Image: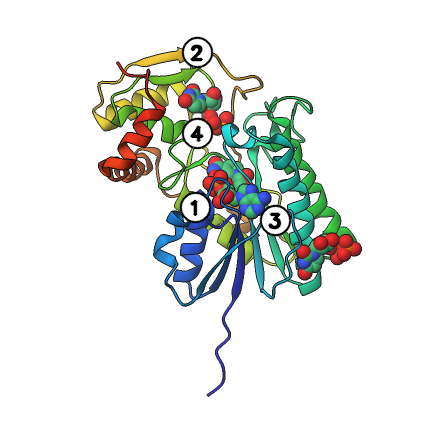
Amino acid sequence: MGRQFTNRVLVTGGCGFIGSHVCERLIEGGADVLCVDNFFTGSRANVEELLAHPRFELLRHDVTMPLYVEVDQIFNLACPASPVHYQFDPVKTTRTSVQGAINVLGLAKRLKINVLQASTSEVYGDPSVHPQTEDYWGNVNPIGPRSCYDEGKRCAEALFFDYRRQHQTAIKVARIFNTYGPRTHPSDGRVVSSFIVQSLLDADITVYGDGSQTRSFCYVDDTVAALLRLMDSPFDVTGPINVGNPNEISMRDLAELIIDLTGSSSRIVYRPLPQDDPCRRRPDISRANEQLGWSPRIGLKEGLLKTINHFNELLMRPSLRSDIGALYEGNHV
Ligand code: NAD
Ligand code: UDP
Ligand code: UDP
């Protein structure tokens, strides 16, 4: 009997929110997964159910250091994604994006394999084109508090396209828009998880600014489906390609929707708008539709209900409830 070929896939940032879902889908699809993470914002708990799986391997490693392994595909997701976490050590954030990109590209070049970059809608900055199409070059403050993330990701995109031009590396660049779902870190300040936890604790819901700024939220299963399709697309499909759900909503409406879905008695309080917070964001996903045959399937209400269930279960664990509750102390009605 001939040996069966299994695809061995490297997932950097595999213990994070999106990464852990990517690892899960890959294992379900029969691949071998090498998950690499430095546990800055991710944790073993996120891949708990995979740890005993014979095709799953976890390596504690920082992507700013070279990595010599033998794999067939690379998903490069390593990078803190929430403003609170990426601004904690901004120099490290830039190094992770830039040096991390050089290392995975060097690896992909040596092995002649596909490498996918988790880029972001933040490359558009505070956009003056709406909705955002991939040919829009963006409006980014190069020296502001978000620039470590925005410019780091922009430089990573430039590196990906230079490796393609210089070395014919098989690159795939996904510009991911706000993604939510189970396993977002409850304390990383991202809006969906924050509003849900605040609602479940009947704490004040903190809307920044007047809440008129918009985002378009994509449920994690939809985002991951797009990333897997992009990875398996032909050599000429390089991206950049927007991955998101065009369903745009203001933060005030989001707060009201979450209060409604949780039946919470929380009230909305208004806090200062962080510097350079984009006013509007909505992806044009025609390219993903045409080139990948992909569009999101899970509506906002359905996805929020799944996410609410997840945080409800987390909060039922007494130790977690008190840890998470402490984050919102002084925030109670
Ligand atoms: P996350 O913070 O949950 O996951 C990031 C993971 O990368 C964590 O497990 C973290 O420990 C790991 N990591 C960070 N620095 C590292 C380093 N130097 N070496 C090794 N591992 C490192 O964030 P996420 O939401 O899962 O985002 C994953 C990727 O998707 C990121 O690259 C992010 O920029 C991108 N993205 C996410 C969103 C979103 O809405 N969630 C939107 C756009 C882009
Ligand atoms: N690299 C790596 N693993 C590999 C090959 C390369 O981590 O299997 C890193 C290595 O640190 C190198 C970087 O990727 O500096 C870029 O590699 P490339 O071959 O493009 O350039 P080099 O710097 O080796 O000339
Ligand atoms: N936001 C908010 N209250 C919070 C956290 C965030 O009103 O407790 C707002 C934030 O100002 C931004 C939007 O929600 O306008 C999305 O923020 P997030 O940090 O989730 O993502 P990003 O700004 O990176 O899109």
**Residue 289 seen:** yes
Residue type marked 1: Ser
> Is the C-beta of the residue carrying label 2 under 8 Å from the nearest atom of ligand 3?
no
* Residue at the spot of label 3: 63
How would you rate the neighbour count of disc 2 (Cα within 10 Å): few for under 14, some for 14-19, many for 20 or more?
Answer: some
Is the Cβ of the residue at disc 2 closer than 8 Å to that at disc 3? no
Report the mark closest to the observer, 2 or 3. 3
Report the mark closest to the observer, 1 or 4. 1
* Lower sequence index among marks 2 and 3: 3
Residue type marked 4: Arg
* Lower sequence index among marks 4 and 2: 4
Above-or-below relation of 155 to 4: above
How far apart, in angstroms, are the residues tagged by discs 1 and 3? 16 Å
Above-or-below relation of 104 to 300: below
In the image, residue 92 lies at what x, y percent? 62, 36
On the rendering, which quadrant does ligand 2 occupy? bottom right
At horizontal 67% and vertical 52% (from top left) the residue drawn is 103
Disc 4 is placed on an element classified as: loop
At horizontal 54% and vertical 20% (from top left) the residue drawn is 277
Report the mark closest to the observer, 4 or 3. 3
